[in-house]
Image (cartoon, coloured by chain):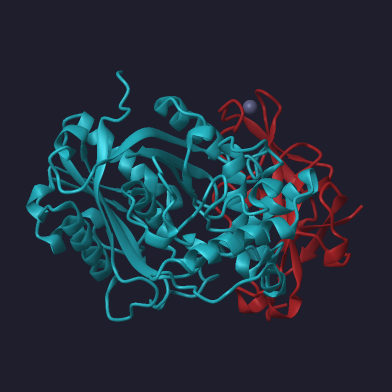
Amino acid sequence: MASLKDKYAIVGVGHSALGKVPELSDYGLQVMAVKAALDDAGLTKNDVDAVITHSHLLGAVRVHHQNLSERLGIDTAFGVSLSAGGATSCLMVQVAAAAIEAGFCKTVLCVHGDKGATRKTPGRGEGGGEFGPEYGLYGAAGQHAFGLTRHMHEYGTTHDHMGAIAVACRKHAQLNPVAAMQADMTLEDYHNSRWIVWPFHLFDCCLRSDGAAAVIVTSAERARDMKQKPVHVMGMGRANNSRGYIHGDHMTELGAKESGAHAFAMAGLTPKDIDTAQIYDCFTYILMATLEDYGFCKKGEGGPFVSGGRIELGGELPTNTSGGMLSECYIEGMLQIVEGVRQLRGECGPRQVKDAETAIISGNGGNAVCHSTLILRN
Amino acid sequence: MSDYAKPIPTPSEDSQPYWEAARNHELKLQQCAACSAFRFPPAAVCSECTSDAYEWKPVSGKARVFSFVIYHRAYHPGFKEELPYVVAVIELDEGPRMLSNVIGCKPEEVRCDMPVEVAFEDITDEMTLPKFRPA
Ligand SMILES: [Zn+2]
């Protein structure tokens, strides 16, 4: 099959109000994100013929692309809800490109978001299960933390390294008016933040947020005549460590390795060619491990790599320039795509990466099993 | 023991024999009849060769801590009094890994690759949890 390199483009991005949005429902947040993305693209809902959503919302009677399309008042040629946890974000863009390539549809809305902060969620630990809850394994933090413990053991990675990531994201958030976390954070503040699940401090963990984001994908050919300068999809990758996070070396070598290799091969680029990285930072450790697995440094050298300002604005690889999920807002990686697109359009004001031409975006989910990668260019 | 406040495992069709063995203070895993691999979690086919022929076999209970975390926050009220507690990825000498608790030492004494052995904890009249202590 011919390469899809540069054949598809992101022509619109948008998000709802972020942070705490008690007045909107889950779908309310999603439709507001869609409105913003359509405006951004200069399109109306009738210009869209496909909807892809994340099937994350639990308990819905119908799958979510139906619910969202109903609220938008559109029939679709193609609709599907995906479930790959935090890898769904970048995977939606890839499925969109594949669906257009297959002739299923022409212009695709990719949408995700919910009330992570203000919805009253059912208490954890209720209901059945085995091989986890009875031993007190709850929440994403515990699972992801196994990886950092092992990484520290094998490579000498330290909390100073994790702190460098948290501080970098916070500095970037302070340049982003919609970011939730605006207070100063020093390395000392990081060390003083309370333990959640050792080796994770509170400041190793991403935010819980309300919010939704939408991304519109169409062919590069159609994109040429649209309102925004198109952001092209150069590379796409995905891979799942689905034998399990605790299997083999999966907790220290994520699906990012294979996913990133696919994306770089398709794009014909190497890590040296990347101007900015927007990495799925559910936890500091996952950001570091992803950069290693993408080849920005050798496995085990991620700690020193993220230190000394290298991943900050002005550094060699400005990373999570919006503040990321650690300091901007959660939305399971959707805002990583939004920020990557905005950087490549040069819209980021005080946090703009100068002359940014290429961006790598990651999604990582299913408790660090599923991974997806996009390489974008302007 | 009826006032046990933590979650009690709900065995599946696949795992019933595992929990029955644990009740008798035996650690048993499925061993593939075709390729001899032990597997965990319990499943109808071998995770190496997909054979559906197997036998439940006792294993040594000898293991090492592959990785671990220390909970400082109780996500379930039943664990509140136990904070801080250790959840570990245990690698059995026979190969498979499983989640469990490391008991019998302080959380700060646990290390990756530390040798451990199984210790059974009867939590109700019907249910016993395999845990691990320093060997
Ligand atoms: Zn077998």
Ligand number 1: quarter of image:
top right
Q: Position of residue A97 (x, y in %)?
A: 27, 36
Q: Position of residue B51 (x, y in %)?
A: 57, 27
Q: Residue at x 20, y 35 (%)?
A: A219
Q: How many numbered marks, from 0 up? A: 0
Quadrant in which residue A225 is drawn: top left
**Nearer to us in this view, A23 or A164:** A164
Residue reaching furthest to the top: A1
Q: Residue at x 58, y 74 (%)?
A: A184
Q: Which chain is cyan?
A: A
**Nearer to us in this view, A129 or A300:** A300
The vertical placement of B119 against A178, above or below, is above
Residue reaching furthest to the left: A46
Q: Which chain is red?
A: B
Res. A84 in view: yes
Q: Position of residue A238 (x, y in %)?
A: 44, 36
Q: Residue at x 21, y 34 (%)?
A: A220
Task: Classify residue A116 as left or right of residue A102.
Answer: right
Q: Residue at x 27, y 76 (%)?
A: A24
**Nearer to us in this view, A256 or B19:** A256
Res. A206 in view: no
Q: Position of residue B98 (x, y in %)?
A: 69, 49
